[in-house]
Amino acid sequence: VPPVAIIGAGGHARETLDIFEAVNEGTPTWQVLGWLVESAFAGAGTLVNGHPILGDLGWLAGRTDGLQLVCAVGDPGVRRRLVLRAQSYGGRFCSVVHPRASVGRWVRLGEGVVVAAGAVVTNGVVLGDHVHVNVGCTVSHDVTCAAYSTLSPGVHVAGRVQVGEGAFLGIGASLIPDVVVGAWSVVGAGAVITRDVPPNSTVVGVPARVVRERSPGWQEG
Ligand SMILES: CC(C)(COP(=O)(O)OP(=O)(O)OC[C@H]1O[C@@H](n2cnc3c(N)ncnc32)[C@H](O)[C@@H]1OP(=O)(O)O)[C@@H](O)C(=O)NCCC(=O)NCCS
């Protein structure tokens, strides 16, 4: 079975380990080697949920053994930065879907996608690279989630919605059909999105209103 390392070792990363372990309970599919972290997190060898911290991303340099990665950091901007660094060392990404998620046959997944337990992704959906769909989300027909977009637990996305690159949908948000969520925007917990969300903005409430606008590229700051 191919070796896999998880980038990150925080709460969301531990939840991602749970997904790999649930897959392995059915059919041994992955050999989880451990965690890759930014050097300040904890020293190599420290055990997290029984798996060692391997080191920082430099640990990837020169590996040619078919190692696969997922980046299990919740913040989309940080996730993108770590993915690009891992790729600069030749890192390759896999996707992982919890056996108790339902992902339809006509769904396309990019690489580095994480789909958690209880998520239901129906028909004609595209989940781009490094998209995370957390526990209990529903994603309806013909939805597109661009790279790095993030659905927190219990988000409900109606048909034909387009979620832009790096958009972060807070816990329990709901999106009505056909809305477009701009890239690198943030949707507050519990918001109901009834109209398009401009890029780089924060929206909250029912119905959601813009409460903050940021400059393009803010996520890299
Ligand atoms: C929307 C959010 C990002 C705003 O964070 P922030 O930029 O730090 O903004 P603030 O906390 O200063 O809030 C700004 C205003 O919006 C209000 N507000 C914040 N979040 C809100 C929400 N989810 N719904 C309604 N109003 C909200 C605040 O009360 C505040 O109002 P005020 O100016 O009248 O006092 C954050 O509150 C949020 O909802 N994050 C989602 C987190 C999440 O779901 N994580 C997933 C974990 S699994």
Image: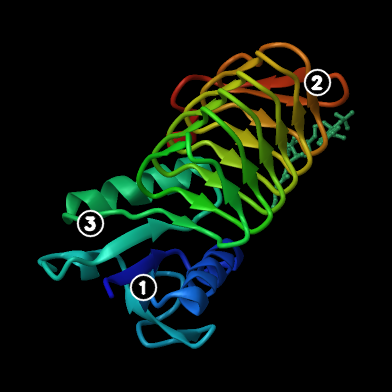
Q: What element carries label 1?
A: loop
What is the distance, in whole Å, between disc 2 and disc 3 at their CAs? Answer: 39 Å
Hey, what amino acid is under mark 1? Trp
Q: Position of residue 219 (x, y in %)?
A: 48, 34
Are the residues at dot 2 and dot 3 in contact (C-beta closer than 8 Å)?
no
Q: Where is residue 2 in the image (x, y as percent from the top left)?
A: 26, 71
Q: Is mark 2 on a helix, strand or loop?
A: loop
Q: Of callouts 1 and 2, which one flags the residue occurring earlier in the amino acid sequence?
A: 1
Image quadrant of ligand 1 equals: top right
Residue that numbered label 2 is attached to = 208
Q: Which residue is drawn at 81% across and 30% down?
A: 191
Say whether mark 3 is within 8 Å of ligand 1: no
Quadrant of residue 150 in the image? top right
- In front: 81, or 19? 19
- Is the residue marked by circle 1 packed among few (<14), some (14-19), or many (20+) residues within 10 Å? some
Are the residues at dot 1 and dot 2 in contact (C-beta closer than 8 Å)?
no
Hey, what amino acid is under mark 2? Ala
Q: Which residue is drawn at 43% across and 69% down?
A: 40
Hey, what amino acid is under mark 3? Gly
Judging from the image, the colouring scheme is: rainbow
Q: Which of marks 1 and 3 is in front?
A: 1
